[in-house]
Every structure is written in structure tokens, then in C-alpha cells.
Image: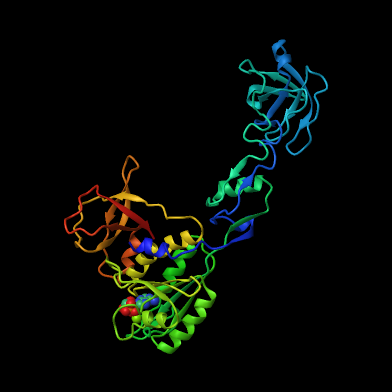
Amino acid sequence: MAEDAIQEQLTVLPPEACPLQTCVGRTLQQDVFAERDNPPFDRVCMDGIAISHAAFERGARVFRIETTQAAGAPAVTLRDGANAIEVMTGAMVPKGTDCIIPLEEYDLDGDVVSLKTQATSKPSRNIQRRGEDSEPGVAMLARGVRLGAPEVATAASAGLSHLTVTRQPRVIAISTGDELIEPGQPILEHQVRRSNAYAIVAALRDRGYTQVVDDHIPDDEQTLTQKLLRHLSEQDVLVLSGGVSKGKFDLVPKVLQKIGVQQVFYQVAQRPGMPMYFGVGPDGQAVFGLPGNPVSTLMCLVRYVVPALLYLSGRGRAPIQPMPLATNVKVGKATMAYFLPVTVRVDEKGAPSAVPAPTNGPGDFLALTRTHGFVELPPQSEPFPAGFIARFYRW
Ligand code: AMP
Ligand code: MG
């Protein structure tokens, strides 16, 4: 299988230290331990008053407020056990108190609190005790996790300003073809807009990869050779589009071989995207030659390049997203997998299914704007019934 053949050639990128603000989406390459107890002190959970439960037990329902305990201030002490201290959520529990009565349960007149009849008291009411969530030194995050918002918050709470994470892959999207013209430049009838490089960069930036650049190379052997040599020396991953079919000007596989890229496979039993190429550079660079048709380019990118980048980032195999077909589908060929664009429909019960939305052909990427991604249908000539569970890939 092409995905396995690619992964076998890849080595996870080395770790680097990064400021916490830039770590989201990266893979953690260290363990994170709790700096302190969590919560670090007995913490007030509601705005209200702190009292001694013993006073309530003795029948006290009216309290004089001695002072206010704000979040961020050291704990004050209740001088007279029959009084109360006004407290704010997140503050330390004042010494001499053990119950927080929320402000909905009393009336306040000046500095005198009168409890309403529904007010209740018990020890530790609305108090989170020190160390209740975790103790210092406990493992909070393990190597290998993706750093989402909760993980970044956890690292911040552990006092870490920097984390060791996998280096971001350096990727270049390279379009090839003499017919291609940059957006913003005048265009003639026989020319084509250079949309693929934009699609590749967009799909990767959308997934959080920041080290993504692009270039364009005409169908000229010498220029291809020079430029690809330079890109190989600077990048971890080359994503070429176009120039991998069997036409006279499809020079990419030949030039890659000349500059020392080892071919791993050339052609995959899939539609679209059959001519896809994959090879490995002299220093382990991953080199993808995607067919130039825009629909094929994007499908091959999402199906193969995106999982490879995840793997390089230390996240192992990309998770499979199963999705049932919403209708019967007849597309199969016994020898080839089929990538079918779909929109995802969610029924009244919240269950998703894939509604086929075929394009007019491999150049019809406008049709993809009305889809969420595609499903991969395995080689099979019989129709696929509604409910068939396929693998879904989102754009
Ligand atoms: P190729 O794989 O080079 O034979 O290209 C196949 C088809 O895709 C041709 O019609 C090309 O003009 C088109 N194509 C190739 N590269 C791009 C690109 N970067 N943007 C848009 N269309 C492209
Ligand atoms: Mg071409």
C-alpha cells in the first residue's frame, strides 16, 4: 500500500525548544510534570462569604463582614469566629473559615449579611482543597501528544515557558509546467492559472504547518535540475505538481533520478492520481510527484502528503476516519481504488454520512468547493451499497 511504502522511508524530525505561544498543533517531545499542588491552595469556588461552619451549626444566620479576600492576595484570617469574610472566586480560603455561602443565599446591608432561609452550610462547601486535582511531580503530559489548547494550558500551569517539540517540517510546493501563469499576471488563451501550488500551500497552512514555501519551474530539464537540487538541500519535503505523466515534457521522474532521488514507487492503482510518484532524497528528504490535474493534486496531497507530515512530526500513523455512504455508488474498477468527492450530511440524530458529489473531470476543482472532502473506495467492480463504511479524508 502506498501509504505504508511512504511511511517506511520517513524518520521523525528532530526536537527543538519552542516558546509556549508557538507550540499549538506541535508534537510534545518531553514529559511534563506538575510544578505544584493543583489547586495550589484551598481555593474559593464561588463569590460569596466565608464563614466558620461551627458558627452556622450553633444557629448563627447573621454575620458581620470583617474584610474582603480577593483572588491573588495572601489568605487573611477571620478574627472573630462569629463573623464572615467576603470572598471572590479563585481567592485563598481565609484562615479560620471552612464554608463558602454563595451570594445568592444572603442579603447584604452595609457590612451585615443575613442568610436567606434556603442557605446551607457544611465543611468544605464551595472549596476546592489544595492538591485535589493533582500533586507536585505527577505526570501531566506525556511525550508524543499533540498540543491542543488543554495541553498548552496544562504546560503553562506547570510553569513552563518553553516546550521541547518536534521541529516543523520544511515543505516546498513546486508547480511545474510552461503553461502556468501566476494569479495577478496577464493570461493568454492557451495558458492556465497556477492554482495547484496555492492549493497545496493552503491545505498545509490550514493544518498548522508554518514552514511552507513555493516555487514554479518550467518544463526545462536544466532548470528543473538546478532548482530541484537547491530545494533538496533546503527542505525536508518537496511536493511537486505536474510533469509526472508519460508525456514528452513530463520530466520530473527523470530529473529526480539524475539528482540522486531514489524512486520508491511510480504509479499507484487509484483514480484519479494514477501517475503519482514518491522518492527519497540523499538525506532522507521526502519527494512527492503529484499529477498536475488539480483534483488529483489535492486528493493525492490529502491522502498521502498530509499523513506523511503527521508522521514526520512524531504523531505516528494518521487516524482513520470512517464514514458511511449516504447512497448506493457505482464507480468501481476491480483493480483500482477510487477517490470520490463527497459532502458530509448530518441526520436528525447527529449521524454523519457521505453524499457523493462527483466532479466533471480531474480539472473541475470548482466542484470541490461544494464538498467537504472525499472517500476512498477500495478496488471493486460491484456497486457499493448505501451504508458502506469508507475512509473519509477532509480537504
Ligand atoms: P501534467 O501532470 O503536468 O501533465 O498536468 C496535467 C494537467 O494539469 C494539465 O492540464 C496542466 O495544465 C494542469 N496543471 C498542472 N499543474 C497545474 C497547476 N499548478 N495549476 C493548475 N493546473 C495545473
Ligand atoms: Mg505539465
Taking depth in this image into account, of 45 and 110 the one nearest to the observer is 45
The N terminus: image quadrant: bottom left
x then y, percent, for residue 186? 42, 84
Give percent across and percent down for residue 353.
30, 49
Q: Residue at x 41, y 80 (%)?
A: 256
- Residue toward you, 11 or 218: 11
Judged from this view, the residue extending furthest toward the right is 79
Q: Is residue 36 above or below residue 82?
A: below
From what the image shows, is residue 348 above or below residue 218?
Answer: above
Residue 200 place in picture, x, y as percent: 43, 69
Image quadrant in which you'd find residue 60 = top right
Q: How many marks?
A: 0
**Residue occupying image coordinates x 52% and y 66%:** 169
**Near-viewer residue (111 or 376):** 376
Q: Is residue 74 visible?
A: yes
Q: Residue at x 61, y 61 (%)?
A: 16
Instruction: Give residue 15's quadrant in the image.
Output: bottom right
Q: Does 107 sit left or right of 326 as displayed?
A: right
The C terminus - image quarter: bottom left
Asked which quadrant contains residue 62, the reply is top right
Q: Is residue 72 above or below residue 97?
A: below
> Residue drawn 20% across and 60% down?
332
Choose between 86 and 357: the one closer to the eye.
357
Q: Is residue 243 above or below residue 203?
A: below
Residue 61 visible in the shown view: no
Farthest left residue in view: 382
Coordinates of residue 121 in the picture (x, y in percent): 65, 18
For ligand 1, the image quadrant comes to bottom left
Colour mapping used in the image = rainbow
Q: Going by the image, does 58 lie left or right of 77?
A: left
Q: Determine the residue located farthest toward the top in the rendered image.
A: 58
